[in-house]
Amino acid sequence: MATQALELYQVTKVFKKDAELIKAVDSVNLIVSQGEMIVFLGPSGCGKTTTLRMIAGFELPSSGKIMIQGEDMTNVPVNKRGIGFVFQNYALFPHMSVYNNIGYGLKSRGEKDSEIKNKVQDALALVGLAGAGNRFPNQLSGGEQQRVALARVLVMEPKLLLMDEPLSNLDAKLRIYMRTEIRRIQKKLGITCLYVTHDQAEALTMADRIIVMNRGKVEQIGTSMDLYRNPQSLFVADFIGQANTITLPVDRVEDKTVTVKTSNGWSFSARAQQSEKINKAGNAVLVVRPEHIQLAPYRANDTSKLSGTVISSVFMGGHVEYRLELGEYGQLLAFIPFASGNSIFKEGERVLIEIDPESAIFLPA
Amino acid sequence: MTKKQEHQEKSILIKKDPALFSALAAVWISLAVFIFLPLLKLLWATFFINGSFSFANLEKILRKPYNVKAFWNSIILATSVSISGTFIGYFFALAVTRTTWPKILKWFLGAVSILPLISPPFTSSISLTLALGPNGMLLKAFGIKNLNFYGFWGTWFSETLTYFPVAFMVLTAILSTMDANLDDAALSLGASRGRMFRTVTIPLSMPGISNSLLLLFGSSLADFATPLILGGHTFPVLPTQAYLQITGMYDLRGGSSLSFLLLIPALLVYLFQRYLIGKKSYVSITGKSGARSEFARLPVALTIIVLVMTLFISIFILYLYFIILWGSFVAVWSVNNTFTLEHYAYVFGHGSKAITDTLKIAVVSTILGSILAVVIGYVVQRKKFPGKRILEFSSMLNYALPGTVVGIAYILAFNEKPILLTGTMTILVAAYVFRYYATGIRSVVASLQQIDPALEEASMSLGADTTRTFLHVTIPLIIPAVLAGMRYLFIHCMTAISATIFLVSVRWTLLTTRILESMTELQFSQASAFSIVLIVLVFIADSIMMALMKLTTRKFGTSQEQIYGNTGA
């Protein structure tokens, strides 16, 4: 078996805050193979940055084991781990030129000046900043500073590239450009990368695998498609893309398929995650994405479809965003593609709601 | 975390971070020798007679009404000075931050108020004596006879002029960091400028005002030189009483007991100040202010009062300095006004040892003091270790205590073996270092608070070890703060007297003590010449430091000077 780039076993971090113990990271397990791009995704305070900082060695885990390329690094100090870390605010040394910033690590490693010069030039070229070596960080734009921060790390040829929300200080357009740029460089160099973000678009576009974290725990690990189609929890369903979650009474559970039935006779079957946890006499949560819903004009006595009332309809250009009232089952959001000539349902109008059973999923309530 | 784990963490500090461990060990040992030992000796001398605990010394001191009077005088004087000094300081701060006066005028006010800060503590006492004392220049000019200037009024007046610049600095800092949008908000809600000033500006400057009151109270309480010259025997205060007890009556126990009386209010003020700072409502400088609006101007009547007041005081201060300058060039003050250079000849002849000694001691103290300040400031701000708060508190203790207390404690501690230091340069340097490195510690801490720890982490993650990171990243970034600390350390080493008056010897003498000698021998012109030389030396050194600070900050274009300004007090 080839050596894994990174292995985490039961990694836990406990902080003491006002005499109270807080588990910032709770028993995280993870195996990352060479060249993989892993994105940690979660709301702020979910423990993703702490996990990254423990991998880097800025913080030591309270318990658990961290191995980098097969070597136990749990208690090895940062400067001996051979990792590269890109900070949210870049952390460029303000008193050094771009050249010296990038050459800093090579110099502490004791490389020859001629060697350093070549490597720094290459790194600058790689990030598209050739010729900017003599400038100082405060003379660079945010995007340029970001590139220098990246070059400073890449020049060290680290075993792991760790990035902590590196794009959050850039404006929206630049962010979109930089994320493809980072992905391009990462693939080109074949470097293993762990990337922390709370921006799901970033996660979806960059990751080979996404790790969704919440309250210190890993909620789910998978490809973006996997997380989108088969969320294991309501949290993941809601965090990746948008999702409607409607609690409905269970009619029957067969193997991995759940059927629900509403009070006015509408019955619906779809796949279920963790079907064993679904109470046959209770409720299940239907997870359906707004883009997997179709609307039709209301016909009386048609119980083959769910019905609802339009609360608001907003024209968004490519699609129309409807908010629908389902009575006792709450509300539903639907995105209906708009083609010219289509009519738009008005507020207060009753409609029939069609849900694609292939795209919907049931979760335990 | 369990007890056991905690214990483990402590015991592995030496293994985990040997550099931190040895730094802490060195700091604790030096604090033990130069702060705790003298203090314990002082308490011992006050409370133990022949090895047993007793209040007899204190009782003996308090039985003399003169000493009780000195205690109350000290308190009354400190209260008056803190109020008047803060008041004037507030006027100056308003003039600089809330008016549209020409830049040159604001510069003038700032420059004049720097003068008392860089002068030896006698300067205003000497010139006030020359102006308002017997045969005083101003008295003659106005034809006033028989004004008894000595006593409370003279001391209060002189100390107010000496210490208001501290209030000015503290209050300027808070007034200039207030959010100007609040002014706009108040005015747009229909408040007049007067109402806005009463309901927005003053309440928001309260933290600064209380801090300034405490600082000035402490300074005045500790002031030794001014009451010695201007107090006279009708207005005894504790520092002068303690001094006379020791130098006049060779009564170390009595002196210790008196300084114990002085220690109590000083310590209370220090604790109260730390409490206030601890819960400070930070006026943060966010850096990314969008459209920065201007502060609203003051009400017209107030503007006029501020203008008259600040100009009058500034001109009066200049006049005082002029008197000293003039006094240093005349043969015998107010008796024979012929121009002469003999006093300068005396200063550079007989006084040259004092000049070189003072400079040597100041340079050595500044270097050692700033190294210690960097180490303490760094570990306190950046490192986690047990006993951190105690370390921070006790490292500043000598600074909080009046110089007289420290001086007496030092004689008690270092007068005999095993640590026999009296008469050496070491004792003078130690007295200065452990008192005045406090400003350095504060400015290093303030500067580190502004520097993102990510910079140090970046260095570590790029393979640099702790030492390399400290030398190549941390130090270059805090150099301006270190220089700011050095600047104040040097000024204090050149001008302070209260502690070192007890510690000078034939082998090591200081300019400030020579000034005092000249004053007590009524050689006013000589005292003036010494003062002028001292002021010029300090001014030159200060300018060099300022230039270095500018040079180091300009390099990476941070506007950090503001921050260092705030820590100057």
Image (cartoon, coloured by chain):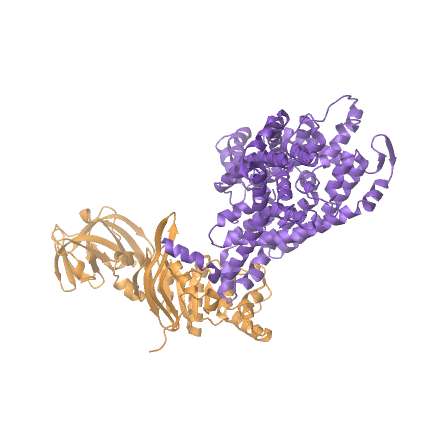
Across and down, in percent, residue B255 comes to 63, 35
Q: Please tell me which residue is depicted at 53% across the width and 68% down the height of the picture.
A: A105
Q: Give the letter of the purple chain.
A: B
B363 or B298, which is in the foreground? B363
Q: Please tell me which residue is depicted at 60% across the width and 29% down the height of the picture.
A: B60
The answer to whether residue A121 is left or right of residue A212 is right
Res B52 quadrant in image: top right
Res B132 quadrant in image: top right
Furthest toward the front, the residue is B50
B205 or B266, which is in the foreground? B266
**Residue B386 against residue B109 in the figure, above or below:** below
**Residue B1 against residue B218 in the figure, above or below:** below
**Residue B375 against residue B38 in the figure, above or below:** below
**Residue B27 against residue B240 in the figure, above or below:** below
Res A28 quadrant in image: bottom left
Q: Give the letter of the orange chain.
A: A
Quadrant in which the C terminus of chain B appears: top right
Across and down, in percent, residue B314 comes to 70, 34
Is residue A342 shown to the viewer in this render? no
The answer to whether residue B126 is left or right of residue A135 is right
Quadrant in which the N terminus of chain B appears: bottom left
Across and down, in percent, residue A124 comes to 53, 69
Across and down, in percent, residue A300 comes to 13, 51
Is residue B239 shown to the viewer in this render? yes
B70 or B91, which is in the foreground? B70
